[in-house]
């Protein structure tokens, strides 16, 4: 009776390579997901800040020029017909027409 080895060096290298590829693909996917989540979070905060600026305008108070919230810096610009807010991962503009 012939005895066969359950694994060979080549099969171990293939298995380790496949595992490494799977880990790298998952890591890349996770990185993309984290970036999208961060962008959505910053956008949501920016919308809330813009809502507050509109409320300040309706109360006849001055618009803030910048704001830091949750360690994220927001640059705010208000004019009579437009509000805009810039943040590290994007920008939102709102026309008051």
Image: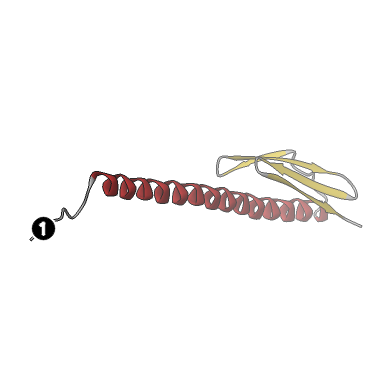
Is residue 35 or residue 63 the one in the foreground?
35
Q: Which colour scheme is used?
A: secondary structure
- Residue at 80% across, 41% down: 77
Q: Residue furthest front?
A: 1
Residue 54, percent across and down? 78, 54
Q: Which residue lies furthest to the bottom in this view?
A: 1
Residue 56, percent across and down? 77, 51
Is residue 55 or residue 47 the one in the foreground?
47
From the viewer's perspective, is 75 left or right of 73?
right
- Residue at 10% across, 58% down: 2
From the viewer's perspective, is 79 left or right of 49?
right
Is residue 35 or residue 1 the one in the foreground?
1
- Residue at 42% across, 47% down: 21
Residue 27, percent across and down? 45, 47
From the viewer's perspective, is 5 left or right of 24?
left
Quadrant of the frame with the C terminus = bottom right
Instruction: Judge whether 52 appears above or below 79 on screen.
Output: below
Is residue 91 or residue 47 the one in the foreground?
91
Numbered disc 1: secondary structure: loop
- Residue at 68% across, 55% down: 48
What residue sits right under mark 1 in the picture?
A: 2
Are there few (<14), some (14-19), or many (20+) residues within 10 Å of tag 1?
A: few
Quadrant of the frame with the N terminus = bottom left
Q: Quadrant of residue 86?
A: top right
């Amino acid at each position: 009776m012939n005895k066969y080895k359950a694994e060979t060096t080549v099969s171990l290298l293939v298995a380790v390579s496949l595992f490494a590829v799977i880990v790298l693909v998952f890591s890349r996917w996770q990185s993309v997901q984290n970036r999208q989540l961060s962008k959505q979070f910053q956008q949501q905060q920016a919308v809330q800040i813009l809502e507050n600026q509109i409320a300040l305008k309706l109360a006849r108070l001055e618009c803030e020029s910048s704001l830091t919230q949750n360690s994220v810096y927001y640059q705010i610009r208000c004019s009579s017909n437009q509000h805009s807010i810039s943040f590290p991962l994007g920008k939102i503009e709102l026309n008051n027409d």
